[in-house]
Image (cartoon, rainbow, N blue to C red):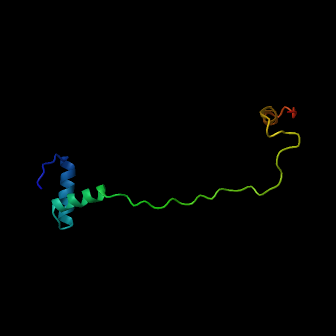
Amino acid sequence: MKTTLDIDDVLITRAKTAAARKRTTLTRLVEEGLRLRLAEPKREPAARVVLPVFAGGGGMRPGIDPCSNRSMLAAADGDGNDDA
């Protein structure tokens, strides 16, 4: 199919030079570029993420109630008020 395109003068000059260097036609060079640009990207499977796991001991300080927001906030603020 024949089509008319408006292409930047510098770009078309570079394309013609590249086509001559590769011993091909400008049409083939443009077709190759379009095929490359329009090709579906090959999707690689996502890499598996390994999350670090803390294997140490410990836990919550004695006196902190994990079911009480007030107790948790008091412990985070460090005010020493550990009552629920």
Query: Which x, y percent locates residue 20?
Result: 17, 64
Q: Residue at x 45, y 61 (%)?
A: 44
Query: Which x, y percent locates residue 31?
Result: 21, 59
Where 83 sits versus 51, above or below?
above
Q: Which sits in the foreground, 19 or 47? A: 47
Q: Residue at x 51, y 59 (%)?
A: 46
Q: Residue at x 20, y 46 (%)?
A: 8
Query: Which x, y percent locates residue 66?
Result: 80, 40
* Image quadrant where one finds the C terminus: top right
The part of the image, by quadrant, that contains residue 53 is bottom right
The part of the image, by quadrant, that contains residue 67 is top right
* Image quadrant where one finds the N terminus: bottom left
Q: Which sits in the foreground, 4 or 45? A: 45
Where 81 sits versus 59, above or below?
above
The furthest residue to the front? 67
Say left or right for 39 vs 64: left
Q: Residue at x 82, y 54 (%)?
A: 57
The furthest residue to the left? 2
How many circles with numbers are drawn on the protein?
Answer: 0
Q: Which sits in the foreground, 25 or 60? A: 60
The part of the image, by quadrant, that contains residue 23 is bottom left
Query: Which x, y percent locates residue 17?
Result: 19, 59
Say left or right for 48 vs 6: right
